[in-house]
Image (cartoon, coloured by chain):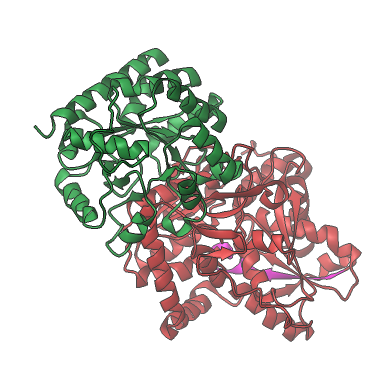
Chain colours: A red, B green
Amino acid sequence: MSQSTATASLRQGPDAKGFFGDFGGRFVAETLMPLILHLQREYEAAQQDPAFAKELAGLSADYVGRQSPLYFAERLTEKLGGAKVYLKREDLMHTGAHKINNALGQVLLARRMGKQRIIAETGAGMHGVATATVAARFGLDCVIYMGSTDIHRQQPNVQRMQLLGAKVVPVTAGDGTLKDAMNEALRDWVTNVDDTFYIIGTVAGPHPYPQLVRDFQSVIGKEVRTQILEKEGRLPDSLVACIGGGSNAMGLFHPFLDDESVEIIGVEAAGEGLDTPRHAASLKGGKPGVLHGNRTFLLQDEEGQIGDAHSISAGLDYPGIGPEHAWLHDIKRAEYVAATDQEALDAFQMLCRLEGIIPALESAHALAEVIKRAPELPKDHLMVVNLSGRGDKDMATVTHHLADELGLNPDAA
Amino acid sequence: MSISATDTDKAATDSRLDRRFAAVRAESRAALVTYITAGDPGYDASLATFLGMAEAGADVIELGMPFTDPMADGLAIQHATQRALKAGQTMDRTLAMVSEFRKQDQDTPIVLMGYYNPIYRRGVARFLEQASDAGVDGLIVVDLPPEHDDELCLPAAQAGISFIRLATPTTNSERLPSVLANTSGFLYYVSSNGVTGGAAPTAEKVEAEVGRIREHTDIPVAVGFGIRTAEQAARIGRFADGVVVGSALIDLQANAETPEQGTHDVHALTRELADALRSARK
């Protein structure tokens, strides 16, 4: 558990130009540059402002429901027969996932900047719901861009956003998933720069977004640190989280980057397998490139054309990854692995049956890695998994895939 | 159309872009800058459109390098990009189009326009060498602001290729010097916030903005975004050094019954625009 003292802290990034090593930056059209420089100044001012911290903390407690529990998964641990598994229960937070932590932080920034209109992209719809929620809470106009494929497979979240007063705009370009929604949100932003704040949902995009989203999500890891010290009297031995863009993972990982004894494991979506073209694992199967304002690992061909990602989980269905993850991969501080659609479905069921918790399909990818890893580890190994969201939104997808196994017939109704 | 710049450009700069803008200025008119997406709707038709563009009256030609995720483009160029990629357009083919063009025309500047990733993936040094060999004069790369000049802008300058920057209504006076710092050839003033193919700006507003930019630079200022008709081009052409038309041409190619008809229609509008600019200041 030795703190890293010989080397510089790994928690200082990004540099002034927004880079984590080779990754990150501000690769955006000129129209947006003055705006993101302004956002950076406002964010720096907010960080120095005790009133901002106070408002965020107050709403996090009373509106979101923080802190989230760190739950010892006793029956899962028993079943796996190895490491002691704790679940960080972000699924219990308001709106059902970690996304609200960031949406709340950014909407407070939007208010500081006097913006009246909020836009966001969403994949699984959890970020869209979180954004629509905070926009409603503060009386701001809200437009959510969502791929048409995702609208189809995450219907309940579309309805939630609409109930909350947001306009959901379907995006049919490309595969109609998260990447295409982000392109469209960027087009909206560049057109409506004067009155619009873009709440990016993950640790990607142009600087300062990867930094500020990470900071707002770091509440997860900070709480885990306090909670595990209370329960076990020491730091965890390993952290596991799923990664699409990587915001829940970065929120868990970041407060532990300098703790060399803590093993850090990110789980990408392997879709139908890394040996097929149908996956979403940008670190395991991609190459460095520039998209959506940052340099990072991307699924792309030799021509630099971006590939369409595939995952059963809409929230992981993105051909890129946050630049700080790309850097942690590069310097080997974190290990990145992948779980297939099937492995995620198996883990999903295991958690339902053993713990009475229905996880999001995204989080089920992290659980799949726990199932592979925990049995090989000693019983005193402390493993913390980020249960980033709940699975209500995934009923249609899961029912479709498990209909035979569960004796369900989705067409019977 | 072939304009010899030697007798009009006493500054004797050696770039095709500088010579062309000087020659056009000497004729007391704005340059017509046209944009088409390379490989749209297919390689042969796109090449035919491209090769006839200067003859039809384009002074500078922007050739779009297709990219899967054109974040700063409206529907017209998004669809053109998809058609081109579907038809098998590659960077090699885009550069081959420029080489073909140079066999018949040594004077008309060619500017490649697009996004950074296809260049980055190819390797900046390799790309610049190939672009230079093909006869490319300038680059417009939408997602490389001055903050990232070391990526491509400065290496391009060393390779003798102009890096043409976009300035927008949000580019305030504080920011303008850094936008202009390493820009050469011309400055592309994006007349409205938004994506390509958007609404046309009012000429008065644009004229004031161009005036503001000219307080900071002597390089030619071309205006684009939302200019679709000869009438609009003429209004902007009264004060701007260049007028950029893209989406209107793309739409003609897209709406034509056959690729040949598309080529014909694009050249017809190009002629109309060129004529309008020649009479705009009279």
Q: Image height check: is A352 above or below B58?
A: below
Q: Position of residue A385 (x, y in %)?
A: 73, 67
Q: Residue at x 25, y 32 (%)?
A: B228
Of A387 and B170, nearer the camera is B170
Is residue A87 one of those drawn in magenta? yes
* Residue B245, quarter of picture: top left
Is residue A410 one of those drawn in magenta? no
Q: Image height check: is A179 above or below A38?
A: above
Q: Position of residue A203 (x, y in %)?
A: 56, 61
Which quarter of the rendered picture does the C terminus of chain A lie within? top right
Image side of residue A207 versus residue B58, left or right: right
Image side of residue A266 versus residue A215, left or right: right
Q: Is residue B30 visible?
A: no
Of B127 and A85, nearer the camera is B127
Q: Residue at x 22, y 53 (%)?
A: B214
State the extent of the magenta-drawn residues as a range.
A83-98
Q: Residue at x 31, y 57 (%)?
A: B171
* Residue B240, quarter of picture: top left
Image side of residue A355 versus residue A113, left or right: right
Q: Is residue A336 visible?
A: yes
Q: Residue at x 22, y 23 (%)?
A: B272
Q: Image height check: is A270 above or below A90?
A: above
Which quarter of the rendered picture does the N terminus of chain A lie within? bottom right
Of A398 and B239, nearer the camera is B239
Q: Image height check: is B45 above or below B135?
A: above
